[in-house]
Image: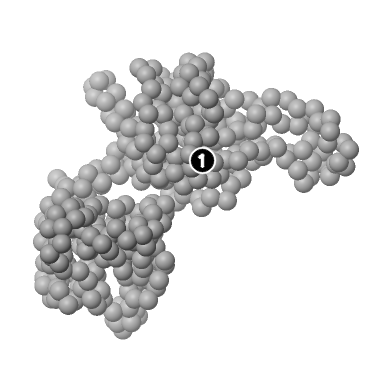
């Protein structure tokens, strides 16, 4: 049975010469068992008729934002919320810009803003348009928000030029969709605990000790774990990063609060990830009111608990415990030492002084340290990096389950 069975895919077709390929794509999706709701922009209707797409998909074609029958129930909101995935194929340069800029000027633009479903774009356009800095900027924006881009391929284009800009073949898009939905269920039945963000250790009523962590990497991991079908429990410190959906969240502002929750919840979890940047010290006797400046020169500090170390030492059989290490020098050596001392299975090591930075940045470059050695990964957007880490986690768990069977 295809993993597309019963998946609701909103297939958005925009106005490029490759729009005709959407007919074959719709046929393949329906054949695989997906429910397909097609959307045709006005420009796309110059290349594909609504009747042909409706016949192949078996569903009425969306096109007019103000169609009375649909909008009687605020149709664009209802449909946006019911879709499991929004696939734009082909995605023109205009469609990419509309999504990146949030232009709700038509049905598709409004849907991009209203949906909570993952967005996948399969671009197709002239190679000069694809390579234009404006298009590349819009792509970067969409990737930062978690959108997935498939293609384009290189080859002969309809305009007679040659280069990147060809829409992926419908059969290839189908293959990727099946792999995507397979990955979304790869951690079904697995409960994961993850810590994220900084902690804030109070000095007095208005001041605290903390660090530069934004929480973006931990939040991206929580979201990717949820996308893979896991039950996710997120313990997070104060952060302005947008909270991930589909996870159970606990605000744990200080190290002691985070530790207490982690120790309570960890025994029920198969995967534990310590991505939080826990402050190293806290003030021994934090003041209830505001201290005068002169009293800030002699603060008595105490070491905070090493949360992931305590969880690693208490690791149960079958648990996968992963820590993060932020270093400025001797990255692999320090990460290897921490993995052994804290009884961790893996350590995700960050060179925090890398070009482009880590704290607050949209991208990260890591080295994955395991018992058999270290593996340096390329620099990725944090959401893409999270997906790759989660895929590695799923592969590890599946391999272990097969070995125990």
Q: Position of residue 347 (x, y in %)?
A: 45, 26
* Whole-percent x, y for residue 41 in the image: 25, 74
Decide which of 226, 199 is in the foreground and name it. Answer: 199
The residue located at (32%, 36%) in the rendering is 391
- Location of residue 291 (image quadrant): top right
For label 1, the residue is: 357
| Residue positioned 40% across, 71% down in the render | 103
Q: Is residue 1 above or below residue 266?
A: below
**In percent of the image, x 84 and y 30: which residue is there?**
298
Q: Is residue 363 above or below residue 7?
A: above
Mark 1 residue crowding within 10 angstroms, few (<14) / some (14–19) / many (20+): some
| Residue that extends furthest to the bottom in the rendered view of this protein | 68
Res 333 seen here: yes
Vertical arrangement, residue 72 with respect to residue 17, above or below: below
Please identify the quarter of the rendering in which residue 117 is found. bottom left
Q: Nearer the viewer, residue 349 or 395?
A: 349
Give the position of the N terminus as an image quadrant.
top left
- Using the image as rendered, state which of residue 180 and residue 71 is in the foreground: 180
Q: Residue at x 29, y 38 (%)?
A: 186
Give the color scheme: rainbow, by chain, secondary structure or one colour: one colour
The image shows residue 5 at horizontal and vertical percentages of 19, 51
- In-front residue for pair 84/386: 386
What secondary structure is marked by label 1? loop
Quadrant where the C terminus sits is top left
In the displayed structure image, the side of residue 266 where residue 401 appears, left or right: left
Q: How many marks?
A: 1
User: Horizontal placement of 288 versus 379: left or right?
Assistant: right
Residue 140 on image: x %, y %: 38, 54
Q: In this orientation, does residue 12 appear?
A: no
């Amino acid at each position: 049975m295809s993993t597309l069975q019963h998946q609701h895919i909103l297939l958005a077709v925009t106005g490029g010469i490759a729009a005709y390929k959407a007919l074959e794509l719709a046929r393949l999706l329906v054949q695989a068992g997906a429910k397909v709701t097609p959307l045709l922009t006005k420009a796309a209707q110059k290349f594909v008729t609504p009747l042909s797409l409706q016949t192949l998909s078996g569903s009425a074609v969306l096109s007019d934002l103000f169609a009375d029958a649909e909008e009687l129930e605020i149709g664009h909101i209802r449909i946006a919320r019911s879709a499991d995935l929004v696939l734009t194929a082909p995605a023109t340069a205009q469609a990419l810009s509309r999504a990146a800029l949030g232009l709700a000027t038509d049905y598709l633009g409004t849907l991009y803003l209203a949906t909570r479903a993952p967005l996948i774009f399969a671009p197709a356009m002239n190679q000069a348009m694809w390579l234009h800095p404006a298009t590349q900027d819009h792509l970067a924006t969409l990737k930062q928000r978690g959108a997935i881009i498939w293609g384009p391929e290189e080859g002969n284009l309809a305009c007679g030029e040659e280069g990147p800009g060809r829409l992926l073949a419908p059969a290839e898009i189908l293959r990727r969709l099946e792999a995507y939905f397979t990955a979304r269920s790869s951690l079904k039945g697995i409960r994961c605990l993850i810590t994220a963000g900084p902690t804030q250790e109070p000095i007095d009523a208005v001041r605290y000790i903390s660090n530069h962590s934004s929480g973006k990497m931990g939040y991206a991991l929580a979201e990717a774990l949820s996308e893979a079908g896991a039950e996710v429990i997120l313990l997070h410190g104060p952060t302005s990063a947008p909270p991930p959906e589909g996870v159970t969240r606990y605000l744990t502002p200080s190290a002691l609060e985070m530790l207490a929750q982690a120790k309570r919840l960890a025994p029920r979890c198969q995967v534990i990830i310590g991505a939080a940047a826990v402050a190293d010290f806290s003030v021994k006797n934090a003041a209830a009111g505001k201290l005068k400046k002169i009293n800030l020169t002699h603060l008595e500090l105490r070491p905070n608990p090493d949360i992931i170390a305590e969880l690693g030492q208490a690791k149960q059989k079958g648990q996968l415990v992963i820590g993060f290490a932020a270093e400025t020098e001797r990255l692999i050596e320090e990460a290897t030492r921490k993995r052994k001392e804290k009884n961790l299975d893996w350590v995700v090591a960050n060179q925090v002084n890398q070009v482009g930075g880590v704290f607050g940045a949209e991208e990260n470059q890591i080295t994955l340290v395991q018992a058999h050695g270290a593996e340096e990964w390329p620099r990725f957007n944090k959401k893409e990096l999270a997906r790759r880490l989660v895929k590695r986690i799923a592969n590890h768990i599946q391999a272990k389950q097969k070995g125990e069977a």
